[in-house]
Amino acid sequence: MSESRPVQDWKTDFDVLDSQYIADPFSIWDELRGSCPIAHTDRRGSTWLPTTYEDVTKIAHDIERFSSTEISVIPFEGVVPEDPVLLYGVPPISADPPLHTWTRRLLLPWFSHKNVDAYEEMTRELCKSLIKSFIESGRADAAADYAQQIPVRVIAHILGVPSEMADTFTEWVRDVLEFADDPERRMKGIEGLIIFFIEELEKRQSNPGTDLLSVLLQSEVEGEVIDARIALGTAALVLIAGVDTTWSAIGSSLWHLATHPDDRKRMVQDKEVWPLAIEELLRAYSPVTMARVVTEDTEYEGCPMKKGDKVLMNFPAANRDPKVFENPDQVILDRAKNRHVAFGSGIHRCAGSNLARMELRVALEEWLSAIPDFSIEEGKELTWAGGQVRGPRQLPVIFK
């Protein structure tokens, strides 16, 4: 389980699972940028935490010294069994070239603008249906009842797996990402995902369809059908990466609109601001931190990094860097200069960014159309998850 000792010095002993870090990482990043832009800790192994836009993006592009073969922010610490099924990890995100290059190429068409446009109608109908289920009550958990219900069903549709398993998929993803210091629970989520996708791939061996799982299984590279374990890992990635990240972005945006009535009113009244507003919400509440592993002893900006050390790709902190973004801690809906890295940077930039943008936009459009005036319900618990992915997990709101 998570270490309970408090952090005494964020420069030399940071902890991304610390309650203070989860509740308010922004002030911690500000402190570190001013005194130690790349922090270090020996908790859970030697790990580095860059906090500036320049450092995060430079490391993201340096694939020779900083490998993507270990992307988990919290090490598995021997939890993952030495199973040949897991040989390839979850490519392309956990792979370096050349494996990364061609597995990413397999995925990109599924998340093109054209295909994402085709998913929009079902996403919109889903959002309307969810809102209809609670609007008469005048209250809802905007995270659990709404944000968390959208991406998992869209991804299930793309993969060609039963949408009625959405709650099970959600539980598995949360086990893997949110309970990183609970080995037993983490293993439960990993095993659930692996067993499910093995069974689904076996079904498609004899009865292929037109869904992503079927296409992956039949894909060829250099004239040979790809290893089924790569198809399994890629499918697991699509579910894991496409669910928690996007629902966190939706939930964080709803939290912002619930607590900033002027911004909420502007988005209701000014449709022209939406393209910039979506990018600004992504910048301000970037949910994802990834990891890289140092491939050789090296010095980076005076930091003596050793082979095997981890570097946390702190994209959320990069998006709050005052050297790049004016008034970075303010959400400026019509911010015009906004080169955020919410979807990462370099060769591992999120392949599903078009889908995530669409889901966020549609989720907010349908919510504000039906519920233009809402606020946090006093006296109810509001909780956030952190570590690999930050976002609200309980978001009680009331409305008329």
Image (cartoon, helix red, strand yellow):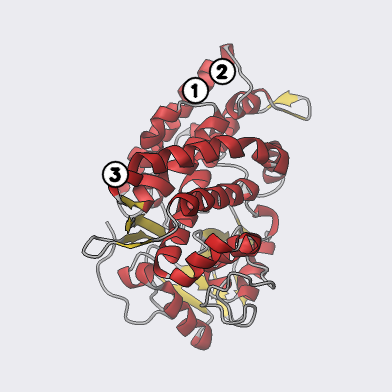
**Which of marks 2 and 3 precedes in the sequence?**
3
* Callout 3 amino acid: Glu
**Closer to viewer: mark 3 or mark 2:** 2
Element type at mark 2 = helix
Residue drawn at 50 percent across, 48 percent down: 366
| Neighbour tally class for label 3: few under 14, some 14-19, many 20 plus, Cα within 10 Å | few
Measuring from the top left, give residue 344's x and y in whole percent.
Answer: 62, 59
Q: Which residue is mark 3?
A: 184
10 left or right of 279? left
Residue 299 picture location, percent across and down? 61, 75
Q: Is residue 164 visible?
A: yes
Which amino acid, mark 2?
A: Arg
Which residue is the site of mark 2?
204
Question: Of the residues shown, which amino acid type is indicated by label 1?
Answer: Glu
Residue 139 position, x and y percent, is 30, 52
Frontmost residue, 49 versus 163 = 163
**Figure quadrant of the N terminus:** bottom left
Task: Please report the residue visible at 48 percent of the width from the left and 65 percent of the height from the top.
Answer: 264
Which residue is at a point 53% across and 51% down the rendered structure image? 365
- Separation (CA) of disc 1 from disc 3: 24 Å
Helix, strand or loop at label 1? It is helix
| Residue sitting at x 49%, y 43% | 151
List x then y, in percent, for residue 182: 30, 51
Q: Is residue 169 left or right of residue 271?
A: left
Q: Earlier in the sequence, mark 1 or mark 3?
A: 3
Query: What mark, if any, has residue 200 been given in the picture?
Result: 1
Is 53 or 99 nearer to us in this picture?
Answer: 53
Front residue of 313 and 109: 109
